[in-house]
Amino acid sequence: MLTIHRLDQSDARVLIEGARARSEQIGVPMCIAITDESGTLLAFERMDGGKVSSAVIAQDKAYTAAAARKATHEYNQVNVPGSLVFGIHTEVGGRISSVGGGLPVLVNGEVVGGIGLSSGTPQQDMECAQAGIDYFTQQQGIE
């Protein structure tokens, strides 16, 4: 029997709040997606001005981070011609993202969900995703 730990709606709102605050600080309206540990969408926010195309991209980044238990930028580093991982972005109906901005959410070393952001540069998306996680861990008292 498995015991599964996952984010709930309250957790998802905290993650979005932290990511949104950072995106407002840098002046880039984002699409923010939160998934549970399986990659299933829990919450989504498209900030005023967030790119239309970024809605799906943010969700795919969160899906990848949670389901694969790996940051999307880690796939980017190895998804190159000649690598055995090349082409991973075509798997799962094209849902695997190798663009920076998707991070797994960990609690006590266990992946409990994913966060994905899109609308800025990959670096801005990564920065805001990390801000969401940092705010979440601070609010939850997690180290």
Image: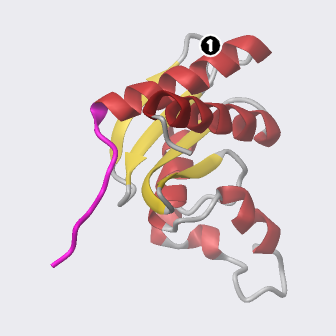
Amino acid beneath label 1 = Gly
Q: Residue at x 45, y 64 (%)?
A: 67
Query: In the image, 55: left or right of 27?
Result: left
Residue 52, percent from left and from top: 56, 27
Question: Which quadrant of the structure image shows residue 23?
Answer: top right
Q: Position of residue 128 (x, y in %)?
A: 68, 31
> How many C-alpha atoms fall within 10 Å of the one at disc 1: few (<14), some, or many (≥20)?
few
Question: Foreground residue, 109 or 23?
Answer: 109
Residue 121 falls left or right of residue 2: right
Q: Give the magenta part as a residue range.
A: 1-9
Residue depicted at x 33% and y 52%: 40
Magenta highlight: main SS: loop
In this rendering, the answer to whether 91 lies above or below 110 is: below
Q: Where in the figure is residue 135, as x and y percent of width and height?
A: 57, 29
Position of 138 with respect to 129 (left or right) is left
99 up-or-down from 22: above or below = below
**Quarter of the figure with residue 73:** bottom right
Establish if 86 lies above or below 5: below
Q: Is residue 52 among the parts visible in the rendering?
A: no
Q: Position of residue 82 (x, y in %)?
A: 84, 87
Q: Residue at x 31, y 28 (%)?
A: 10
Q: Which residue is mark 1?
A: 49
